[in-house]
Image (cartoon, rainbow, N blue to C red):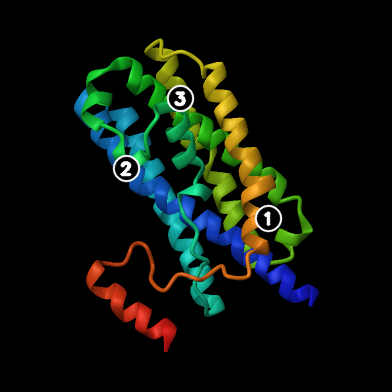
Amino acid sequence: MLQTAHRRYLDILASVYIYNEHRGYSSLDRVLEAVRAKYPDDHVFIAKVEKHRADERKHYLMFRRYFEHLGRMPYEVDHTCGHIDRLIKLTFGCHIDELDTKAVIADDALFNKLCRIIMITEIRGMRQLDVLLQSFLVTSDKSLAKIFKVIERDEPSHWVPYRYWLKRHNGGKPTFRELLSDWWVHRSLIFAKLPALYLNPWLKRRTWWVDEPLAERAESTARVTA
């Protein structure tokens, strides 16, 4: 019974992470669009954002292989488990998919805010990894712990470039509202959303991978439900 409870906890934790990694790299495509349009000659910063995007994609694939090795799919979680989703909603007033890229490109204040939000999210992620890698519940699963250690190694290169960019362009430090929003998103996720997922007996698993082409999703669903 304890083993089953432990396995469920790890699967839910990994499901939340794989969701966030996918949202991370897919959202960074829009950030790259803004950076390339607004600062086409800043090749160093563009390269840093490209590396950030590549790392997020790499992390997603690591979690996907983890679940494939287990022979099961991640649990079906949504934007309510996404740190960047909820932080964008609180600070920009819209869902991340609705963020107006053209407006961000045209307005320095909006672009600075976006960089601050990304920096805050990555710093929060780094701090949470410190907690997870000190937990026996996580480190007892060597495969999962290995993934978290890779993310821990990559994490500084994800937020430091945005901090340097903000300093060079007088983009300001995170505002009180932005920091408060980050605190609230993190606390509500850890103390409300994750326990609710764990205790939800109707929580379903995904039937297709989010990066699969639409044409292949029906086949994946058929294999999982067979």
First in residue order: circle 2 vs circle 3: 2
- Is 64 above or below relative to 84? below
Query: Element at badge 2?
Result: helix
Would you call the spot at circle 1 few (<14 residues within 10 Å), some (14-19), or many (20 or more)? Answer: few
Residue 41 seen in this snapshot: no
Q: Position of residue 115 (x, y in %)?
A: 41, 26
From the viewer's perspective, tell me whether residue 28 is left or right of residue 155: left
Name the residue that disc number 1 marks: 195
Provide the residue designation for mark 3.
116
The answer to which of 223 and 147 lies nearer the viewer is 223
Q: Is residue 196 left or right of residue 21?
A: right
| Marked residue nearer the N-terminal end (1 or 3) | 3
Q: Quadrant of the N terminus?
A: bottom right
| Mark 2 vs 1, N-terminal side | 2
Q: Nearer the viewer, residue 67 or 194?
A: 194
Q: Is residue 38 above or below residue 144?
A: above
Say which residue appears at 57% left-offset and 31% top-offset: 182
Tell me the distance, in whole angstroms, between the alpha carbons under discs 2 and 3: 18 Å
Q: Are marks 2 and 1 in contact (CB under 8 Å)?
A: no
**Amino acid beneath label 3:** Arg
Q: Are marks 1 and 3 in contact (CB under 8 Å)?
A: no
Q: Looking at the image, which residue is at 52% across and 35% down? A: 121
98 lies above or below 208: above
From the image, state whether disc 1 or disc 3 is nearer to you: 1
Q: Residues within 10 Å of mark 2 (few under 14, many from 20)?
A: few
Picture layout, residue 14 above or below residue 190: below
Separation of marks 2 and 1 at Cα, in angstroms? 27 Å
Task: Tell me, yes or no, if residue 189 can be seen here.
Answer: yes
Residue under circle 2? Answer: 97
- The amino acid type found where label 1 is placed reads Pro
* Mark 2 residue type: Asp
Image coordinates of residue 17 in percent, x first then y, are 53, 54
